[in-house]
Amino acid sequence: NAGVMQNPRHLVRRRGQEARLRCSPMKGHSHVYWYRQLPEEGLKFMVYLQKENIIDESGMPKERFSAEFPKEGPSILRIQQVVRGDSAAYFCASSPPARGSNEQFFGPGTRLTVL
Amino acid sequence: DQQVKQNSPSLSVQEGRISILNCDYTNSMFDYFLWYKKYPAEGPTFLISISSIKDKNEDGRFTVFLNKSAKHLSLHIVPSQPGDSAVYFCALPHGSSNTGKLIFGQGTTLQVKP
């Protein structure tokens, strides 16, 4: 029973390029969350998605960032025209469809480095 | 605004002794509280949780205490083991929405010395 999978684990981009981060939730989980961890800080919520729907994107920067969770395939966090300040660890988490389950299961993260 | 605070960035204890990690929150609407443990280069792993209707929850060596009036929770690890060395985060599901997003503290790095 595989856990939450994220790829790539490490991603290096130059300023101005695009970064695509992928997340496959645990089997049977239909809720996906993206968090960002800057150095020496805690995890900060970015976006919460269910299949084909963005439920809460209150933590997403207004520009350059987007997320999707299509009917088929993994969830994608996309960062356009990356800047050095985007360098961080990006974690995806998933939870089962039943409400009342507050526990979220995290993937290993993608470490983005912007040169 | 920092809704969840872990004021101690680091803690060092001797193997076999008790580790106490603290977490304070500002919003009384939080009604469920979680602790996560994180090793370097890995994602956070759920450790233990507590509902606001309780003031204590125990799971083996790990106990979480909740003081609602003080808006304070703590994680006790006893006896501490070297393998417990990690970063510990308290995390609170956002109380006033139904989105399930977690609000994390900044984390406390625990080092257990053999």
Image (spheres, rainbow, N blue to C red):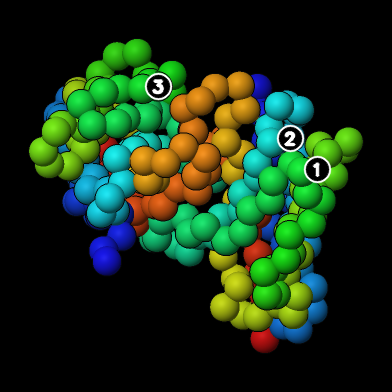
Q: Residues within 10 Å of mark 3 (few under 14, many from 20)?
A: some
Q: Residues within 10 Å of mark 2 (few under 14, many from 20)?
A: many
Q: Which residue is mark 1?
A: B72
The chain carrying label 2 is B
- In the current view of this chain or complex, which residue is farthest to the left? A72
Work out how far the residue at label 2 is from the one at label 1, CA to CA, in angstroms.
Answer: 6 Å
The chain carrying label 3 is A
Image coordinates for residue B53, horizontal then vertical, percent: 77, 43
Work out how far the residue at label 3 is from the one at label 2, CA to CA, in angstroms.
Answer: 22 Å
Element marked by disc 1: strand
Using the image as rendered, state which of residue B50 and residue B39 is in the foreground: B50
Q: Residues within 10 Å of mark 1 (few under 14, many from 20)?
A: some
The chain carrying label 1 is B
Rendered residue at 52%/40% (across/down):
A100
Q: Which residue is mark 2?
A: B25
Tell me whether the residue at label 2 lies in contact with that at label 1, contact meaning CB atoms closer than 8 angstroms. yes
Image coordinates for residue A44, horizontal then vertical, percent: 48, 34
Res. B62 visible in picture? yes
Element marked by disc 3: strand
Using the image as rendered, state which of residue B107 and residue B79 is in the foreground: B79
Image coordinates for residue B88, horizontal then vertical, percent: 61, 57
Is A89 on the left or on the right of B106, as rendered? left
Q: Earlier in the sequence, mark 2 or mark 1?
A: 2
Against A15, residue B55 (above or below) is below
Element marked by disc 2: strand
Rendered residue at 61%/21% (across/down):
B96
Q: Which residue is mark 3?
A: A56
Disc 3 versus disc 2: nearer the observer: 3
Q: Amino acid at mark 1?
A: His
